[in-house]
Image: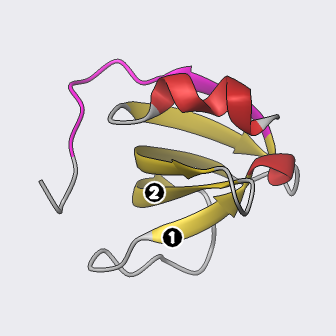
């Protein structure tokens, strides 16, 4: 996806489908135009190795196939 398309998801909980097959439910904290990526708190993931819940992660916009708002209120471990 393009970063411009991901900006609408800042401060929302969304489901991301990644190019490597991973599906992740994340809270989007920030869209970084300089690096063309988003900063997220990962809430759930199909990845076999778990994410550290006390950390935020960077996902490159180019690695995201699709994004859709999740069916629950926005949540962030930092907020």
Which residue corresponds to the image point at 31% horizontal and 74% vertical from the top-left? Answer: 53
Which residue corresponds to the image point at 43% horizontal and 54% vertical from the top-left? Answer: 44
**Figure quadrant of the N terminus:** top right
Q: Quadrant of residue 49?
A: bottom right
Q: Tag 1: Cα neighbours inside 10 Å, few (<14), some, or many (≥20)?
A: some
Q: Position of residue 21 (x, y in %)?
A: 82, 51
Q: Nearer the viewer, residue 55 or 52?
A: 55
Would residue 79 appear left or right of 56 to someone viewing this image? left
Q: Nearer the viewer, residue 40 or 34?
A: 34
Q: Position of residue 67 (x, y in %)?
A: 64, 28
Q: Which residues are magenta?
A: 65-75
The residue indicated by pointer 2 is: 40
Q: Nearer the viewer, residue 51 or 64?
A: 64
Q: Quadrant of residue 43?
A: bottom left
Vertical placement of residue 34 versus 8, above or below:
below
For marks 2 and 1 on the same chain, the one whose residue lies earlier in the sequence: 2
Residue 48 shown in magenta = no
Would residue 68 appear left or right of 56 to someone viewing this image? right
Q: Tag 2: Cα neighbours inside 10 Å, few (<14), some, or many (≥20)?
A: many
The image's mark for residue 13 is none
The image's mark for residue 57 is 1
Which residue corresponds to the image point at 42% horizontal and 59% vertical from the top-left? Answer: 42
Vertical placement of residue 77 versus 14, above or below:
below
Q: Position of residue 12 (x, y in %)?
A: 35, 31
Residue 71 shown in magenta = yes
Question: Dot 1 lies on which element?
Answer: strand
Vertical placement of residue 54 versus 63, above or below:
below
* Residue closest to the far front: 34
Which residue corresponds to the image point at 50% horizontal and 59% vertical from the top-left? Answer: 39
């Amino acid at each position: 996806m393009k970063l411009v398309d991901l900006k609408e998801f800042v401060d929302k909980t969304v489901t991301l489908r990644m190019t490597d097959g991973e599906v992740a439910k994340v809270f989007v904290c920030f869209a970084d135009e300089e690096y063309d990526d988003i900063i997220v708190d990962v809430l759930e993931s199909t990845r076999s190795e778990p994410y550290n819940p006390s950390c935020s992660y960077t996902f490159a916009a180019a690695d995201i196939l699709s994004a859709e708002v999740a069916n629950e209120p926005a949540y962030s471990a930092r907020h």
